[in-house]
Image (cartoon, rainbow, N blue to C red):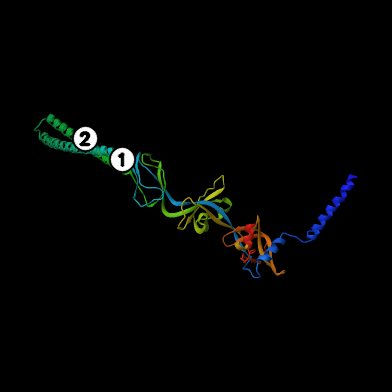
Amino acid sequence: MRMKKAAGPLAGVFGLVLLILWSGGFLEKKPVGPDTALTMQVEKRYPEAPPTATAERTEIVDWYEAVGTVRPRTETQVEAQVTAIIKEVRVNPGDSVTKDEVLVVLDDRQLQSRLEQAKRSMESAQAGVDQAAQAVQAAMASFDRASSQYRRIKSLFEEKAVAESELDQAEAEYLRAKAGLEEARKGHTAAQASVERATEAVQEANIALSYATIKAYEGGVVTERDADPGDLAVPGKPLLVMRTGTNIRLEALVRESLIGKVRPGKEFPLHIPALDLTITGVVDEVVPSADPQTRTFLVKVTMPDQPGIYPGMFGRLLIPMIKREAVLVPPQALRRVGQLETVVIHDPNQEGWRTIFVTTGQANATAVEVLSGLHGNETLALPVSVAGPDSGSPAEEGADG
């Protein structure tokens, strides 16, 4: 009984709702699609002849982007050749230096001491040479006397004027003088060798002393400083890193399937994202060994001199892969509605403008590839500004969502 009483009021309410919906036009059957609302907006916002562009169907190249790093063509590590305490470091990263400019000064007191010792040893060796020369002269005089005496006694013995014993004695004196001369000459030779060794020691000490002042082997730019005054400089420990010369290179990793396209002497585009710069480089070297973990080859490409490019910057080596047809449109012709991308094209059948959804691919500053939605040769409307409160452009509508 209660259900019958409640059914009457519910039916009345339902009927009233249907009447309101019908009067508002919500029950009319209208074809509604993704472009319906957007087409209405375009008709309101676009004039009869907006600025236009054409969707161009053309042949493009797919590029493989090998990532790499800008590095100097020649990089020098400045190291000490002797062990000593660092007194001065006269340069800092970024400083430009010239050939033979002083970079680092070491404590040279110990090296000076070694040089003085070597000089004293050379003086002593020279004195030994003088003594040996005097000994040779004395031995030579003794030998001359003994030789003269021996010849005289031998002549008298042949004339039977002297006994054989005197001849034997003169001969013995002669042989002793001869041996003494040979010994004196050997001593002189040894003394001269000592002088030569002492001279070389002095030269070596001078060279070691020169190592206390570290100079630039050639002009360049200091890129790293790894030492300060008070540090101990030892051979093999880098003190500074310098970029010598003006050439720089992009060292990029290229996958093994494309290494056949890369050969020394070939030119490829290089892109430096930080500068939004694309330049042409020449392959200088391909390391003939792949990394077994990444299966990539190291390729070194020489870059032209360009302001603003510094070692350590990120870059890409662009290698052409295949050519294919694609539809390109100006970036200004695209607008975004949330996550969707649309363009406004001229519809010759309806003699008006309509909005269609597209999918885009690669893009640069002048063109965007359209993967789907356009076939090419369509006329596209570019953004315009129309006076009035409802004015706007596709780009502006897309920005507002």
- Residue lying at 56% horizontally and 56% vertically, measured from the top left: 319
Residue 292 appears at what percent x and percent y? 56, 45
**Which quarter of the figure has residue 119?**
top left
For the residue labelled by badge 2, is the local secondary structure a helix, a strand or a loop?
Answer: helix
Which residue shows up at 85% across the image and 50% down it? 9
Disc number placed over residue 232 in the picture, else none: none
Position of residue 121 measured from the top left corner of the image (x, y, whole percent): 24, 37
Asked if residue 78 is positioned above or below residue 57 in the image, the reply reads above
Q: Choose the circle earlier in sequence order: 1 or 2.
A: 1
Which residue carries the number 1 mark? 108
Q: How many marks?
A: 2
Q: Quadrant of the N terminus?
A: top right
Decide: is 224 above or below 374.
above
Q: Nearer the viewer, residue 376 or 204?
A: 376
* Residue 150 versus residue 315 in the image, above or below: above
Please say if 179 is above or below 31: above
Residue type (three-letter) at the residue carrying disc 1: Asp
Query: Which numbered circle lies on residue 183?
Result: 2
State the residue in front, 8 or 332. 8
Distance CA(mark 1)–CA(mark 2) = 43 Å
Left or right of residue 249, residue 123 in this image:
left
Q: Residue furthest right?
A: 1
Q: Is residue 318 visible?
A: yes
Can residue 334 be seen in the rendering of this structure? Answer: no
Residue 339: % across, % down: 65, 55
Element at badge 1? loop
Left/right of residue 84 with respect to residue 141 in the rendered view: right
State the image quarter where residue 228 is shown. top left
Q: Residue type at mark 2?
A: Glu
Q: Quadrant of the C terminus?
A: bottom right
372 and 291: which one is in front? Answer: 372
